[in-house]
Image (cartoon, rainbow, N blue to C red):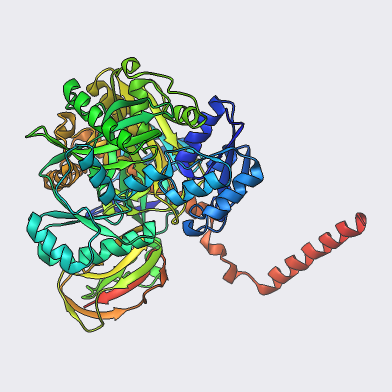
Amino acid sequence: MKLRASIGEYQTDIQILAEASRLSADIGGRRYEVNVLELDGGGYLFISDGRIFDCRVEGRPQSGRTIDVIVRTESYAIAITDPKRLRGSKAVDVHIVEAAHIVAPMPGKVVRILVKVGEQISAGNGIMVVEAMKMQNEMKSPKTGVVAALNVQVGATVNRGDVLAVVE
Amino acid sequence: MFRKILIANRGEIAVRIIRACRDLRISPIAVFSEADAAALHVRLADEAYCIGPASSTQSYLDIESIVAAAERSGAEAIHPGYGFLAENAEFARAVKEAGLIFIGPPPDAMEVMGSKTSARRAAIEAGVPVVPGTTEPLRDYEEARETAIRFGYPVMLKAAAGGGGKGMRQVEIEGELRSAFDAAKSEAASAFGNSDVYLEKIVDRPRHIEIQIFADMQGNSVHLGERECSIQRRHQKVIEECPSPVNDPYLRERMGEAAIKIARAVDYVGAGTVEFLFSDTSREFYFLEMNTRLQVEHPVTELVTGIDLVREQINVAAGASLSFTQEEIHWRGHAIECRVYAEDPENNFFPSPGRITFLRVPSGPGIRDDGGVFEGAEVSIHYDPMISKLATWGRTRAEAIDRMRRALDEYAIGGIKTTLSFFREIVRDEEFIAARLDTGFISRFNQRREERPSERPHPAGGSQASSLQQDIAIIAAALSYLRSQSQSPTSHTPQDESKWKIAGRAAGLNRTALKKRSEHP
């Protein structure tokens, strides 16, 4: 199967063929013949030329979605894109958005809002304070601009990934 | 000796206390919130009582429910652990009034030391040097502003009832004071139910060195040497060592004596820790505060002295005299502890709650792991994100570091982000290995880390070995994608299926179910 892999800015083609415990791969022209053992809980044990690589994949992979792969103690954020999946899906949006979305990095509670909609702010200014695990964290604006939207109120419970505010 | 002890805590410290109870053949009683019904400390206890909903103010901080659980279980004593109610004099009194023993110091001593301002007064009276600062809580912002000008910036705002870095803010310039003052007050109010804050001058590049003390009811008091806790982030310790790399027996003696003086001044009983700031340049130390409880980092002292501090706490609370004298305490080798937090070091140490999908805990020579979780456990958003304390012992600091490096590499926690990767870098850091430590270590380490060219292998550059490892990661990701495709063939999505077929199958299922029921009336 032919796929595309990206780690940060690096992108490469990958072709793999797995038959029982034998796996052959071609990554941008580099060819590998490895033995693979599937472990419980999303783990793989690869043996390449006698060298052991204990791997764990975190999260369910989907085309275009970044997942964490841990090899030994090193973690890699990798996105696998399936060319067959690109056609059907809505075009992956790559137009540059001018707005910065302030996203909740974890579940928590909004304890203070420090700005108003329409307010001019500079990069690094605090937008709101979110309390999680007994710590108050100030959410800062990554850019200079105008507060275009505040989607939450003081006291609101927020989930990871919620867009709290937009700065344009 | 007690027959039953109730542990008014959760997580790794509850597990630690259960272990001491087991050693002493005492039956451990757990309490838990609704979020912790299947937690490790509950599973290891003999009895467990639910004391309220997930929110700690309605459970682990609810004095009435905890005392009621103790009475119901027939426990004779309560161990508060650290955090939650451990330094709450009102709780200690409530325990006493219920006719039970509080495993900790007398409430009066807790009260004096519990407020950082009265603790400072006690230290001054005992003749122990203190850092310049206010001895009374600040009345308002204006007083904070004037005091800060008097001491000169940078200054530190601290919660009077505080601990664990909560309600604490470093202020570099006056422009930052207002928001820091408000934040510290509101954080102090939500963490400790007391919004009082005070102000201290900041000592330049200080080491944080603390002395473990122990006193019994017979009037014996000893010190068990120091721990160095200079490696902190957000004023929270992350790595602790015993002894301090300064390792000066004369200094240990002087600091030990000062710590005992403070303990005696408040008629202290049990385990306590006196924290000092130590200036490398002047070799002077200043009293910072006293923690009237068992410390998170107590294992490093245990590893080096061989004394089980929790066991000793229980013995002393039961009325026994200390099982050792000052002369019998010897410090052997070196111990280091890393606090493993469910936090993402790549994202400003944001908490990373969730389910632990994979767990491999290191072991082998010189390794001790005090954990409170298991594979499948949920790291909740409601509580402190510390999930375990990994400690290593070696004959020398270098050997302890070697073992820590090995143990960190063996340690694997899946499903959540942890600080393990951060520690793996620290134990390889030259400044850390050379023991050039002070409380600014982490921010300088982070700076070095940013300046260092990325070690992330890149197939274009990078060594052959590292690019091989990266390719293996790509293969694993691709293989995992492949497997997910074969498990859920997309040509067969539910929408594609005929509604008739679905209905027919459901009817078929009902028929067989009915048939079964009629066979077994």
Q: Is B469 left or right of B216, judged from the image as shown?
A: left
Above or below: residue A58 compared with residue B126: below
Q: Nearer the viewer, residue B146 or B367?
A: B146
As drawn, B168 above or below B393? below
For the question of whether residue A52 can be seen, the reply is: no
Residue ID at (26%, 82%): A117
Can the viewer see residue A90?
A: yes
Residue B290: percent from left, percent from top: 30, 41
Q: Position of residue B329 (x, y in %)?
A: 33, 18
Q: Splitting the image into 4 quarters, where does residue A100 fall?
A: bottom left
In the image, farthest residue toward the top: B328
Q: Which residue ends up furthest to the bottom in the rendered image?
A: A118
The quarter of the displayed image where residue B351 is located: bottom left
Q: Quadrant of residue A56?
A: top left
Total labels drawn = 0
Which residue is located at x 32 percent, y 49 percent? B163
* Residue B67 left/right relative to B221: right
Is B436 or B331 nearer to us in this picture? Answer: B331
Where the C terminus of chain A falls, by quadrant?
Answer: bottom left
Residue B239 vs B491, above or below: the answer is above
Residue nearer the viewer, B499 or B45: B45
